[in-house]
Image (cartoon, grey):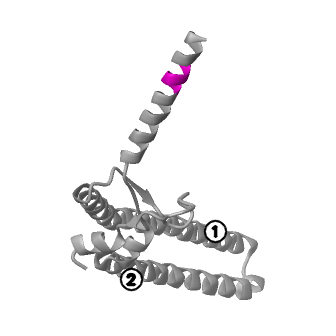
């Protein structure tokens, strides 16, 4: 019986200590996706990426139009040409199509590289501001409340307005 009392006292102390520790942790949340979308630097980066995408797309579209025109021309002239000339023209069109595919892949890689180059500093800036605001307000944890981020209930403090103020927008 004496042994059971010791276990019960130890259990009560353990539960109390755990509750005390949990009560000390302060948790806040922020919709990081919304923050990034509203940042002026992100809007500038999006505009730059859109412009680059349009430029690269226009170049590729012009090449594709040229390839289609050549294919149509060769198809129309095929009956009047020799089999050897037609085979040579067919090979030329295939080479042209491969060149276009390579250009498309290079354009996609260039766009991804530019996106990473533009977005990395913006994301770093946002994270530093979140960390600074959380530390200044005494929060131990900040949850990402973006849709699909895993936060189901966000009743704690929302740091979005404070982080925007820290970022001066």
Which part of the image, by quadrant, shows the C terminus?
Answer: bottom left
At mark 2, the secondary structure is helix
Question: Of circles 2 and 1, which is in front?
Answer: 2
Residue 85 screen position, x and y as percent = 68, 74
The residue identified by callout 1 is 94
Seen in the picture, residue 139 relative to 169 is either above or below; the reply is: above
Residue 144 screen position, x and y as percent = 45, 60
Question: Does 116 lie within the magenta span?
Answer: no
Q: Residue at x 65, y 74 (%)?
A: 89
Left or right: where 95 falls relative to 41: right
Q: Residue at x 33, y 63 (%)?
A: 123
- Residue placed most toward the observer, 15 or 161: 15
Read off the magenta span.
Answer: 7-11
- Residue placed most toward the observer, 24 or 86: 24
At mark 1, the secondary structure is helix
The residue identified by callout 2 is 51
- Residue placed most toward the observer, 123 or 155: 155
Seen in the picture, residue 125 relative to 15 is either above or below; the reply is: below
- Label whose residue precedes the other's in the sequence (2 or 1): 2
Residue that lies at the very extreme toward the right in this rendered image: 79
- Residue placed most toward the observer, 168 or 16: 16
Neighbourhood count class around disc 1 (C-alpha, 10 Å): few under 14, some 14–19, many 20 upward: some
Q: Quadrant of residue 16?
A: top left
Neighbourhood count class around disc 2 (C-alpha, 10 Å): few under 14, some 14–19, many 20 upward: few
Residue 160 screen position, x and y as percent = 35, 71
Q: For the residues marked 2 and 1, what is the alpha-carbon distance in whole angstroms?
A: 30 Å
Disc number for residue 130: none
Left or right: where 86 falls relative to 42: right
Residue 156 screen position, x and y as percent = 43, 63
Give the prevailing secondary structure in the magenta stretch: helix
Q: Residue at x 56, y 11 (%)?
A: 3
Q: Residue at x 31, y 59 (%)?
A: 127
């Amino acid at each position: 019986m004496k042994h059971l009392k010791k276990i019960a006292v130890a259990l009560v102390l353990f539960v109390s200590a755990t509750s005390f520790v949990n009560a000390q942790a302060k948790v806040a949340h922020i919709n990081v996706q919304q923050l990034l979308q509203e940042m002026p630097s992100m809007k500038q980066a999006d505009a730059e990426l859109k412009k680059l995408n349009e430029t690269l797309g226009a170049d590729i579209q012009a090449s594709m139009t040229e390839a289609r025109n050549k294919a149509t021309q060769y198809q129309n002239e095929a009956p009047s040409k020799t089999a050897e000339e037609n085979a040579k023209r067919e090979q030329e069109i295939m080479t042209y199509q491969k060149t276009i595919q390579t250009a498309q892949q290079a354009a996609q890689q260039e766009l991804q590289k530019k996106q990473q180059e533009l977005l990395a500093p913006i994301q770093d800036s946002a994270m530093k501001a979140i960390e600074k605001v959380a530390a200044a307000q005494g929060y131990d944890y900040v949850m990402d409340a973006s849709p699909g981020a895993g936060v189901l209930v966000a009743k704690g403090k929302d740091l979005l307005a404070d982080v925007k103020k820290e970022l001066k927008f």
